[in-house]
Amino acid sequence: MSDERAPLEQPRPKAVRTIAYFITGFPLHLVQFALTVVLLGVGLATVVIWVGIPLLMFTTSMVRGFGDLERRYVRRMLDSPLPPVERAPAEGGVLRRWRYRLVDPTTWRDLGYVLAALPLSAVEFAVGLASIILLPMAIWVAPWIGWAHGSLALALLGPNRAKRLEAKAQRLQASRARGVDAAEAERRRIERDLHDGAQQRLVSVAMSLGRAKNKFDKDPEAVRELIAEAHTDAKLAVAELRDLARGIYPAVLGDRGLDAALSAQAAKSPIPVDVEVDVDPRPPAAVETTAYFIVGETLTNIAKHSGATEASVKVWRADEKVVVEITDNGHGGAEIRPGGGLAGLADRAATIDGVVTVVSPEGGPTVIRADLPCAW
């Protein structure tokens, strides 16, 4: 399974792991809360006699450790994209390092999470126990509460605003670079197709017409054959140019939209393909084009490599993005590899800040999903 997800977007977690997190998280958060409150209270109460200073130092380090533990635990159990925190090394003596930790915003966010987690965990513990008995709660309620908890953890334990903007800028820079590479590869493909296809046909037409011109008065029958040959080559050149233009931007897509264009693609597939499209209002042209080529290249790969007997294409509008989902019943095992076909799909989506996700366990089925924003 390969996943290219925009960073810091909390997905909906799996039900079993969420219930396990609810049940095991309550005693863990209870211990964290009790240790933090007791040591913090004792430290503040005894700071005037100097005993509280080492206690507060220890409490500060402990809270930061709790925060790191929660990042790993939430990331594993709730599928949260929480990255490990980057803490700059503190230099100097013990007091100077402690002062640096106190002014670090991450320390206070860790503390806020530790204090907020206990009341939440008490409710989640009850939900977790009920989910073991009540199947509807396990399927629908627990994952959404887990999603809310993961979002809270992402807000408190995740990178601050500056770090997020920096990460987004880096991701956009990388996606633009990949988009430039994809555009350059497309330009070379068009140049190669023109050189090897239509250009050769037109050269053949010119040569046939030149020979016909030389024989016009001497051998009318040969002239007729040469003109017929040139006419055939000219029609082939026109067909190749039409196919090339369709590969750059299909006319049916511009005239009738994604539904008609994807249905036409599915009709050409050697395996049955079910198509469902609901994208009203109509998305921007760049999104339509990207979705069209992602579906086309994916269906081609399915027919060549997957061993599938059927496939489905679903395209729908979700808030300010278009979601494209292609599923097949092939043997699975697909993943995004550098230089591979799926990497090319990811590069194409990246040109408009889109994200491609591939879920393909051995034995299938394979699901390829592209989230394409309508504003970037």
Image (cartoon, rainbow, N blue to C red):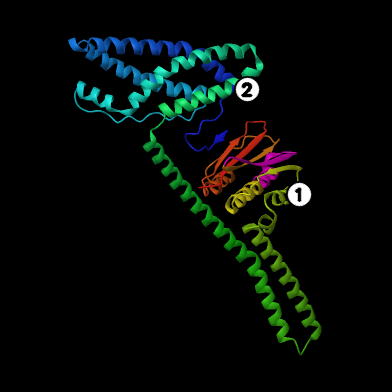
Name the residue nearer the viewer: 341 or 22. Answer: 22
Disc 1 residue crowd, few under 14, some 14–19, many 20+, Cα 10 Å: few
Reply above or below: 60 against 11: above
Tell me which amino acid carries mark 2. Trp
Tell me which amino acid carries mark 1. Ala
Q: Is residue 255 left or right of residue 94?
A: right
Residue 33 position, x and y percent, is 39, 13
**Which residues make up the magenta segment?**
298-319
Q: Which residue is mark 2?
A: 140
Reply above or below: 197 against 288: below
Q: Which residue is mark 1?
A: 267
Disc 2 residue crowd, few under 14, some 14–19, many 20+, Cα 10 Å: few
Residue 123 position, x and y percent, is 52, 14
Dividing the picture into quarters, in which one does residue 71 lie? top left
Disc 1, SS: helix
> Does the magenta portion include 309?
yes
Asked whether the beta carbons under mark 1 and mark 2 sit within 8 Å of each other, the answer is no
- Residue at figure coordinates x 45%, y 25% from the top left: 153
Name the residue nearer the viewer: 291 or 229. Answer: 291
Disc 2, SS: helix
Dividing the picture into quarters, in which one does residue 32 lie? top left
Earlier in the chain: of badge 1 and badge 2, it is 2
Which quadrant would the N terminus be assigned to in this image? Answer: top right
- Residue at figure coordinates x 64%, y 36% from the top left: 367
